[in-house]
Amino acid sequence: MGRSIVLPAVALLAAAGCRTAPPPARVAPAPRAPETPEPRPGDDEIVVGGERIPIGTRVVTWTQSPFYSAYLPHPRFSDEGPKGLRYRPGREVEGPWREAVDLFVLHYDACGTSRRCFEVLQDIRKLSVHFLLDVDGTIYQTLDLSEQAWHARHANPRSVGVEIANIGAFPLDDAAKLDEWYGHARGRVWGVVQGQELVQHDFTPEQYDALVKLAA
């Protein structure tokens, strides 16, 4: 989709346990603020090789609404579009896939929202990525990490991919387009890419927070 950053992958480990205990005395529940959603089991879990691993931030998997599933062999938002797989089942590597995956590839999606990004990947380009990171910090997982997503060409077999919702970088003369998109002058980031000076709006604090937890 957009430009990418490649970081070394990190190992993910988790442990859980439980025990039974006598039920507590009945006490009236404390009032909950109406804008605070009731937490549900699994809301912070990614899926790695069929195992659910909590990461401490909101995750919506492909089996949950709005069903951003790269497993679908057809478009998600229309009846027209290319049919067929959007990913490679399993990993195109020798030996255990967990040992082969050593890249964490970060893209800005050039779409601005995860919904639009998934629509472009699934319905139009017949591509995929493991995670979408929306502006509000919500992480959408579209595939198990044991599957090979189509997002980084030759690096696909050894990588995990993340599309971060951000309209992307523009030449300095076109910087006004960023404010038209976001509606306000959010913090900007400047840099030189392949000899061209570009500017883009920074990621949101919610995106940074979620990305730190996902990477860890």
Image (tube, rainbow, N blue to C red):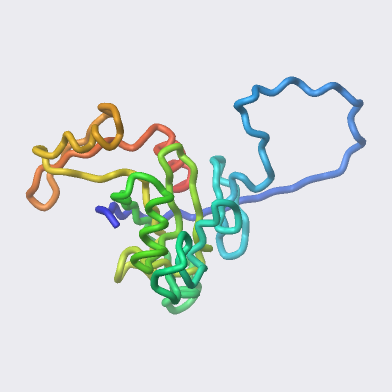
Nearer the observer, 55 or 37: 37
Q: Is residue 190 above or below residue 125?
A: above
Q: Is residue 42 above or below residue 160?
A: above
Residue 75 found in image quarter:
bottom left
In the rendered image, the quadrant that contains the N terminus is bottom left
Q: Left or right: 94 with respect to 44?
A: left
Residue under the point 34% across and 66% down: 125
Residue 177 horizontal/vertical position (percent): 20, 38
Residue 121 horizontal/vertical position (percent): 38, 61
Q: Is residue 79 above or below residue 163?
A: below
Q: Left or right: 81 with respect to 69?
A: left
Q: Is residue 86 above or below residue 67?
A: below
**Furthest-bottom residue in view?**
94
Nearer the observer, 152 or 65: 65
Nearer the observer, 67 or 214: 67
Q: Left or right: 95 with respect to 22?
A: left
Residue 101 found in image quarter:
bottom left
Residue under the point 55% across and 49% down: 60
Residue under the point 61% across and 64% down: 50
Residue under the point 10% across and 43% down: 197
Residue 148 found in image quarter:
bottom left
Query: How many callouts does the rendering have?
Result: 0
**Furthest-front residue in view?**
79
Residue 169 horizontal/vertical position (percent): 21, 44
Residue 6 horizontal/vertical position (percent): 31, 55
